[in-house]
Amino acid sequence: MAAHTESHNPALLHHFATEEQQRNSASFGMWIFLATEVMFFGGLFCAYLVYRRWWFGDFAAASKSIDAFLGGTNTAVLICSSLTVVLAIWAAQTARRGLMILMLVLTMLFGLTFLGIKGIEYKDKFVEHHVPGSSFSFDHEEIPGQPGHYANPHHAQIFFALYFVMTGLHALHMIVGLGIFTWLLWMAWKGRFTPEYHTPLEIGGLYWHFVDIVWIYLFPLLYLIDRHP
Amino acid sequence: MSDHSKSSPLPTYFAVWGALLVGTILTYEVAKIDLGVFNSAVALIIATTKALLVALFFMHLKGASEKLLKLVVVSTLFFLILLMALAMFDYGTRWYS
Amino acid sequence: MATGNIPPVEREDYLNKHYGVGSWLFTTDHKRIALLYLISITFFFFIGGFFALLIRLELLTPASDLVQADTYNKFFTQHGMVMVFFFLIPSIPATLGNFLVPMMIGAKDLAFPRINLLSWYLYIIGGIMMLHCMVTGGVDTGWTFYTPFSTAFTNTKIVEAGLAIFVAGFSSILTGLNFVVTIHRMRAPGMTWTRLPLFIWAHYATSIIQILGTPVVAITIVLVAAERALHLGIFDPKLGGDPLLFQHLFWFYSHPAVYIMILPSMGVVSEIIACFSRKRIFGYSFVALSSISIAVFGFLVWAHHMFVAGMSVYAALIFSLLSYSVAVPSAVKVFNWTATLYKGSIHYDAPMLYAFGFLGLFTIGGLTGLFLAALGIDVHVTDTYFVVAHFHYIMVGGALMGYLGGMHFWWPKISGRLYPEGWARLAALIVFIGFNLTFFPQFILGYLGMPRRYADYSHMPEFQILNVFSTAGATVLGVGYLLPMVYFLWSMRYGKPASDNPWNAAGLEWQTQSPPTTFNFPEEPVVTWEAYNYDEIDKGHKEVPQVVG
């Protein structure tokens, strides 16, 4: 089983016996890291669950004030970016360097689009004084389905606190993801990826898909609490 | 994992992509219908279906040779649900809230 | 029982292979990283111990005469934060775990050596942040940071302390991640799951907790920091928030965290008891499975810290019931260790003395945990010294004893030197006596009603005598901790050189030289024997664990 004497791929690290062991370990390591990320976001989802149940009407009113169309568009953008990621990996597997680079660039463009739309949303919230803090105000907003009843601004502030922390943390992960993909793009450009070795692409892809999955849950929970006309 | 499948995975990828987009539109439209308490359930079911599609097909969990990765995913979700369920057991049985 | 002989020539090992500060600060050798951690956590142990000393000095007299209450609050807070996050959580996994996990499974290194080094740097960064926080004002909320005091009322450096813990927590997560991947993927041929040393099983279980639990306290810290900065209201009842939500999220990690602290120690105890009774651990699979059970069950019980906090009484009932169940796997282990001792050939070397101490003290700590799990008792002793005594019996009488026992057991392997056995046995005895003198009176104090976290107990002056015993015990305990520091350092230069296997112990780590080479084994081992095959070893079977080399 000794691998020392055989010539091997320079990407094989010395403490691994085979490339397969290295690849399996890297993939497993990334999945475990994603497990920690699930628990990280999970605490926020738990807080959200508690307060949505407590202050449903106030949360519904606050949710109505964020733009569901932009949120939905962002969901579609991320879904497209996940597609381009798997296509990039397929391109690596089938030695299509040009396609791989194109798909990586598209993925990053989608990611930047997502952040751009997010920026617009945040700006809207800032202008409307819905950012928690000393200048927060949420007066005279009707609770959906209860005409004449107005949302409690304190409870609405909790919604917006969770909104900003959850989407902000998500956006931070997107930015890190863009950094990772910049590095992957550089490696792809340099020709480091072959059908036999493209592990960084695979594990970068896993991370990206995870960020997509988080948003898949954030969208309905934050944007669509009560959209009955 | 770079498993060399006999047939091209491309049709599957595009089908999943299509399903995800349809699911998104569905979520958006169903939210406008008043289903009472079932609005949340429907939204979460659609979201979970989408998440499963991404995990199984885009993240290649379906083709994974070992059960290990699936065990990681299932255990993590178990503990997350545990956090929420047991916390809700407190919140659900406090009378004054 | 330890044997030593002078090796013929100066052999190359992981210590002398490269010299210079750079070779240490940029190493990816898991053994060197373990030593980097050893130095760092020992440093923080003394910082935490320093605060303990201040606490005990204040409590010598009923009045708050050494310091004011505000300052005293900082003492116990910083004692707790430093001891929990910067000593106990990393202690065994980052030192003995880092050193031994690859060796015990026959690997050259951990799966991700560079992440291992990153893990240490994160720990150091978190440690520096915590030190800075403490010297520029510190924190006074208790290590538990309860809201809304920590978010809306205190003026101390919550955000900085929280960020320090966040960074250190990331270090903990990466260590756990590394161990899980390593144990799954890097085992030598023939090292099946049922042949793994119980030390490995213990670290596997610990790593699961680190991976799944730590992120939740991380996000809780983020929320506390956000609440402090922006007055959000998430935990503020005036604004519609719930202080108990903080407690749910905090304890979801912090209860399993105590299993992070004890499980590795239990792994050490298994190794020591097997070696020094020359017997296979009784009920190996039960002990292995109980490690995993403790990890899983440990996540089900967190709200037993919240019985009197204002939680629903129905939830309290459920958590009380679940808390009883988590004691079962621990008891299974104690029974199995005891059964191992039965008809064993017992040797009373220092590691074994620590293991015996662990058995008794952990059992007492664990049983008092059951008292606390009972709602009726807990209502009376919550927030008293009974609780303080309970957790110190487990963490100091249990975890720390295991750590010291392990340090002694594997010292010849780590350093290539023998420690002085006579001094070590004396130190173990001093630690045991000092420990009990410090903490047993605290059970009584708590039962009689002395509250914890009080600088001033002058309304109950009759408690002074027990407090004086406790402080006296703490002094003795301190001496007991200083002794190993001195003689371990002494042994590095003047200790007898150790042979490869001075204890004649089972385990792959003993089948290579002391200290090991950088890549641990000259050739990849192939395992054909069961764990703890002491019967074969003691019969002198030649084909038993000698790796070709």
Image (spheres, grey):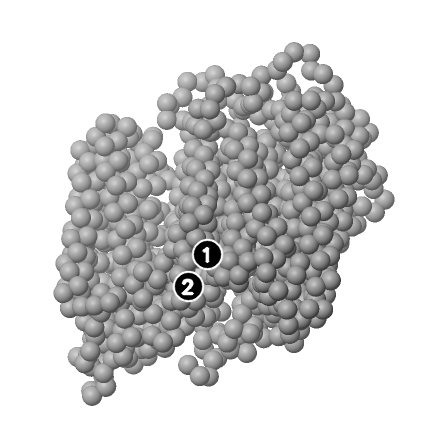
**Circle 2 SS class:** loop
Disc 2 to disc 1, C-alpha distance: 9 Å
- Above/below status of C95 relative to C25: below
Q: For this rendering, which residue is in front, C58 or A223? A: C58
Quarter of the view holding residue A69 = bottom left
Q: Quickly name the residue at label 1.
A: C139
Label 2 crowding class (10 Å Cα cut-off): few <14, some 14-19, many 20+?
some
Tell me what residue is drawn at x 65 percent, y 22 percent: C493
Does the CB distance between marks 2 and 1 fall below 8 Å? Answer: yes
- Above/below status of C335 relative to A219: above
Residue C387 left/right relative to C221: right
Which disc is residue C526 wearing?
Answer: none
Residue B34 left/right relative to C166: left
Q: Quadrant of the C terminus of chain C?
A: top right
Tell me what residue is drawn at x 76 percent, y 34 percent: C423
**Residue A124 visible, this orientation:** yes
Quarter of the view holding residue C528 = top right
Q: Sequence order check: which comes first, mark 2 or mark 1?
A: 1
Quarter of the view holding residue A228 = bottom left
Tell me what residue is drawn at x 45 percent, y 18 percent: A6
Q: Could you say where residue C408 lies in the image, as x and y percent from the top left?
A: 69, 35
Residue B81 left/right relative to C503: left
Q: Quickly name the residue at label 2.
A: C154
- Above/below status of C483 relative to C83: above
**Circle 1 SS class:** loop
